[in-house]
Image (spheres, grey):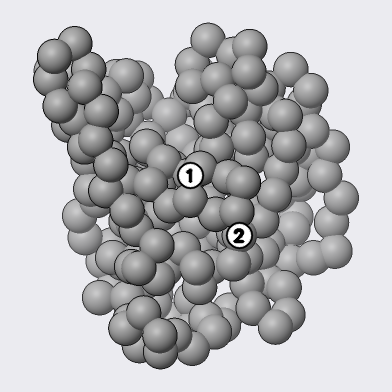
């Protein structure tokens, strides 16, 4: 795959499988101001849906009343629980709970580097291919909606913006990838940048 903004080929399932099989995942961008000390382990699923003519990435928008990151665009996922045997198990369990996407539809490719957040989480992004057709049933308490974005859009560096915000007098920078009416930013955008670095280097 070429990485120039205007010369993308459509990524295929076979190309994605080969990329994950052929090389280590490398480093991930991290948020500024990550607290010292132990972080809370968490995991998310990065679901790449094998649509024709090109794959998409399935994302969710969190409900507005949640304590952590209300209204933000995210991947399905959450904290690692005591019964989870691995971060992969966490990602699959949380995906079933949040959007009812069953693990039988998911072909696991591998994990990206852990992403550490200013809110104290260490997130393992688990990448999987999702084979349609499938039906989603959203957990109305946690998930306001689910939507899909073309993978080629998310891998295009022309869509990787850097924004900044003042937090208690300190300027913090973060990634953002606006798409239509959706503002993809923060940890979700950072993990998508990590996916781009891995697939397109």
For the point 43% across and 52% down, which residue is it?
177
Tell me what residue is drawn at x 21 percent, y 22 percent.
166
Q: Foreground: 161 or 66?
A: 161
Left or right: where 12 falls relative to 136: left
Instruction: Tell me residue 102's x, y (percent).
Output: 76, 47
Percent coordinates x, y for residue 107 in the rendering: 62, 63
Q: Residues within 10 Å of mark 1 (few under 14, many from 20)?
A: many
* Residue in the foreground of this view, choosing between 178 and 46: 178
The residue beneath circle 2 is: 149
Q: Give coordinates of residue 67: x percent, y percent.
A: 53, 10
Based on the displayed image, in which of its 4 quarters is residue 173 positioned? Answer: top left
Q: Secondary structure at mark 2?
A: strand
Sequence-first disc among 2 and 1? 2
Q: Which residue is mark 1?
A: 184
Q: Are marks 2 and 1 in contact (CB under 8 Å)?
A: yes
Whether residue 38 can be seen here: no
Query: Which numbered disc covers residue 38?
Result: none
Q: Measuring 73% from the left and 37% from the top, which residue is drawn there?
A: 145
Q: Secondary structure at mark 1?
A: strand
């Amino acid at each position: 795959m070429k990485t120039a903004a205007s010369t993308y080929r459509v990524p295929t399932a076979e190309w994605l499988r080969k990329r994950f099989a052929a090389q280590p995942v490398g480093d991930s961008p991290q948020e500024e101001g990550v607290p010292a000390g132990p972080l809370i382990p968490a995991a998310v699923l990065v679901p790449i849906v094998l649509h024709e003519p090109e794959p998409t990435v399935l994302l969710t928008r969190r409900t507005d009343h949640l304590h952590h990151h209300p209204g933000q665009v995210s991947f399905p996922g959450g904290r690692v629980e005591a019964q989870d045997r691995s971060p992969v198990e966490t990602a699959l369990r949380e995906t079933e709970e949040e959007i009812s996407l069953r693990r039988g539809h998911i072909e696991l490719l591998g994990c990206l580097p852990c992403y550490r957040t200013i809110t104290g989480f260490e997130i393992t992004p688990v990448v999987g291919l999702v084979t349609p057709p499938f039906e989603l049933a959203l957990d109305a308490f946690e998930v306001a909606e689910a939507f899909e974005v073309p993978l080629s859009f998310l891998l295009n560096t022309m869509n990787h913006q850097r924004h900044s915000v003042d937090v208690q007098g300190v300027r913090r920078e973060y990634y953002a990838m606006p798409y239509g009416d959706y503002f993809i930013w923060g940890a979700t955008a950072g993990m998508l940048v990590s996916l781009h670095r891995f697939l397109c280097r």
